[in-house]
């Protein structure tokens, strides 16, 4: 049963906590604003589309997301992209931005931009150290993030991360990105839903630790035995 979410802190567990009944422990980390300072999506899209193009797409995507519920728009939105009708503003904005920036982009070009993202990373050192300590104690380490799986494996390559849940982008048979999210936006309640399913499929686990920021990560932190709310790292 989940315990109350801890007060904001970045302190790691003081010592090893034996997994319940011999089962392995699990440590789940958010990425943007938790393991790293800032948000990774816009730096990645700038590397793919270019800074000036990204700025234009940002403005148009925000306008489109804001107008999706206006009278006369519902049928058009639902007819063109059914998922849009149920999006909250942030997901509607992200969906439009990804379409504008990534549709028609060769996968190889996106992978080159992902490799260049290594220069962007600014680790939140206390949380990175916490992750390393969990791995040293033999816990399974999962990163659950709304960031794109296009570039996340590159950014996590030097860390002992066993599994990744993220936002996946569709690739056509021609090797071009479609600009569409494969299974939606891996954030908030959707992240918690995917995590719960992943734990059922890969578990059972002993003690479960979670690290994320508020309010967006509170749904998945509620699934943990010990939840640490991290002040968002900028």
Image: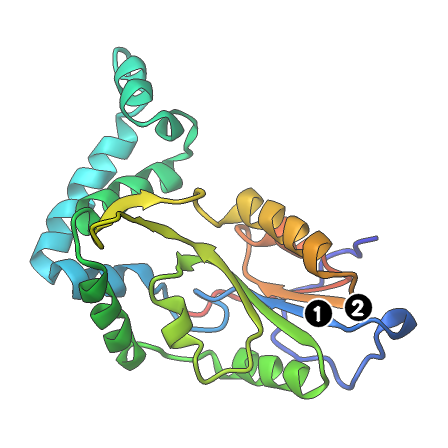
Mark 2 secondary-structure assignment = loop
Q: Quadrant of residue 178?
A: top left
**Left or right of residue 226, residue 127 in this image:** left
Within 10 angstroms of label 2, few (less than 14), some, or many (20 or more) residues? some
Q: Which residue is mark 1?
A: 26
**Residue at x 17%, y 62% (from the top left corner):** 48
**Residue at x 49%, y 84% (from the top left corner):** 125
**Left or right of residue 196, residue 119 in this image:** left
Q: Is residue 205 above or below residue 128?
A: above
Q: Position of residue 216 (x, y in %)?
A: 52, 51
Q: How many marks?
A: 2
Q: Quadrant of residue 155?
A: bottom left
Q: Position of residue 31 (x, y in %)?
A: 47, 66
Within 10 angstroms of label 1, few (less than 14), some, or many (20 or more) residues? many
**Residue at x 65%, y 79% (from the top left corner):** 11
| Picture disc at residue 207 | 2
In the rendered structure, which disc, 1 or 2, sits on the residue that comes first in sequence?
Answer: 1
């Amino acid at each position: 049963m989940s315990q109350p979410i801890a007060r904001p802190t970045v302190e790691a567990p003081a010592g090893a906590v034996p997994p319940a009944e011999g089962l392995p422990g699990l440590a789940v980390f958010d990425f943007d604003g938790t393991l790293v300072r800032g948000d990774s999506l816009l730096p990645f899209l700038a590397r793919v589309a270019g800074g000036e193009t990204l700025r234009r797409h940002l403005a148009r995507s925000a306008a489109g997301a804001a107008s999706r519920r206006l009278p006369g728009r519902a049928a058009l939105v639902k007819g063109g992209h059914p998922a849009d009708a149920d999006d909250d503003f942030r997901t509607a904005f992200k969906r439009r931005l990804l379409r504008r920036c990534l549709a028609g982009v060769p996968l190889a070009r996106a992978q080159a931009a992902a490799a260049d993202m290594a220069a962007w990373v600014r680790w939140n050192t206390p949380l990175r150290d916490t992750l390393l300590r969990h791995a040293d104690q033999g816990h399974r380490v999962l990163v659950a993030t709304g960031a794109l799986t296009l570039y996340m494996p590159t950014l996590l390559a030097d860390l002992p991360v066993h599994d990744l849940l993220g936002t996946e982008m569709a690739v056509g048979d021609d090797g071009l990105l479609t600009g569409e999210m494969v299974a939606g936006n891996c954030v908030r309640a959707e992240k918690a839903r995917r995590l719960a399913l992943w734990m059922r499929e890969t578990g059972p686990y002993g003690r479960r630790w979670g690290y994320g920021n508020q309010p967006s990560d509170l749904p998945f932190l509620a699934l943990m035995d010990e939840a640490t709310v991290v002040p968002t790292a900028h």
